[in-house]
Amino acid sequence: MNDGKRQSDLPDVDEKHLLDLLHHNSDWVWEVDAQGRYTWVSGVVHDLLGYEPGYVIGRTPFDFMPPGEAERVAGAFGEIVSQQRAFSGLVNRNMRADGQIVVLETSGIPLFNDRGELTGYRGIDRNISNLGERVLQLETIYDTTPVALCMLDLDGRLVMSNKAMNGLLNISPEEAAGSLLGHLMPDVWQQFQDDFFLVESGVIIPGREIIWRDRCFDTQPVALYNASNRVVGLSVTWVDITARREAEQKLASANQVLQQYAQRDHLTGLYNRRYMDERLMNEINQAVEDGFPLSVCLADIDYFKRYNDNYGHQSGDNCLRAVAKALVSSRRRPEDNVSRYGGEEFLVILPRTDQAQALAEAERLRENINALMLPHVASPTHYLTISIGVATLYACESLSPDTPLHMIASGLIHQADTALYAAKNRGRNQVVAMPENAS
């Protein structure tokens, strides 16, 4: 002994005094056999449950619990017995003889015979009704919430996990207890390891989206601290946002389709005039900033009304599609934009292109349409042709900085339209640029 006295020097504690200590303690002391039946109980059981010790002997702890609670605790105790280990802090509801509920905290140690066989358990029950009911409610909420929850220690062990989390991992509660997340989710554990480093660096842990087994989860880790304010783990919520992400993707696809409808001409598939107006102003702004010329070609199908009158509107639509396809396939560069300006007119925007280059490009477009050799009996050439007007904006031109872009664009289109009108007056199937003396 620490005081130096030998065991034989200490006064004997008689059995009556020992029993008096057990029967009048604040804790209920008990023993059960390997089947969980009480073999000895202290008199405190009467204070806690309202039953005499003799009534309790031979019964199990689960005989004094409400049915649902008995099943829950029996499952937890069965796991403890299978491992033949000590336990503590097992919170459980019990029904007193008068029908009232009392909440107990149970702890125990295993008992073995000389052959090392488990013969039962010895332990104590403590009344924690004032706090226990609240604890049980919180545990129930934690375990049954549809959001997956878990607690990880610094090594990545699952200290706690609720039903939703076990379902996410596809493991049983018994398998989850003490499992290493690094074994279950190696890639995910690496990210949480990074979170521990962030916490130690004083950085707030960010939430992140994690893909796991074709499901998308929004995870929110929160650092856990001990009494010494040291990080001891993480509490992590896993919200399944798969349905939301799928809905967002569908919405994005729908918006993309709507955007295409808003920008595209439904007949030819080319960009429409609305999009062309925005694109042209952007190109003008870029041309002015970079100091490069910008050209536009306004093309019109010759004698198109006659074509419709002779072949019908369905053939007229097919003709527009054929011309649109030919103009797009004739582009030299991806940035050269082709749009349907309206009716049988098409606009081609040529960035970084001077008038001479634009005239050459327009002539090539005209020749490619001629090469289609689409029959047009009402045309002097007896096949489909186009006329093109070209206009060029030079950055060196005196443009007032206060001039709105839409006015500059309007002026450029007006010049191209004037050139197109001149091409029509000169016999069609040709290219004209305005101003004709530009260099």
Image (cartoon, rainbow, N blue to C red):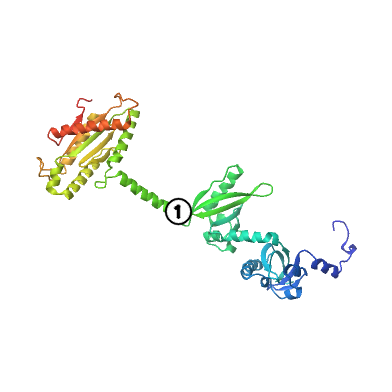
> Which residue does the numbered mark 1 point to in the structure image?
244
Q: Is residue 413 left or right of residue 222?
A: left
The one nearer the camera, 343 or 419, is 343
Q: How many marks?
A: 1
Position of the C terminus by quadrant: top left
Q: Is residue 357 visible?
A: no
Position of the N terminus by quadrant: bottom right
In the rendered image, the vertical position of residue 92 relative to residue 154, given as above or below: below
x and y percentages locating residue 351 in the rendered image: 29, 33
The one nearer the camera, 350 or 371, is 350
Question: In the rendered structure, which amino acid carries the disc numbered 1?
Answer: Arg
Q: Residue at x 67, y 63 (%)?
A: 90
x and y percentages locating residue 47 in the rendered image: 76, 68
Element on which disc 1 rests: helix
Q: Is residue 20 left or right of residue 66?
A: right
Q: Residue at x 27, y 36 (%)?
A: 349
x and y percentages locating residue 255 in the rendered image: 37, 48
x and y percentages locating residue 327 in the rendered image: 22, 41
| Quadrant in the rendering for residue 157 | bottom right
Q: Is residue 237 visible?
A: yes
In the rendered image, the vertical position of residue 67 relative to residue 250, given as above or below: below
The one nearer the camera, 179 or 102, is 102
In the rendered image, the vertical position of residue 104 relative to residue 316, given as above or below: below
Within 10 angstroms of label 1, few (less than 14), some, or many (20 or more) residues?
Answer: few
| Quadrant in the rendering for residue 53 | bottom right
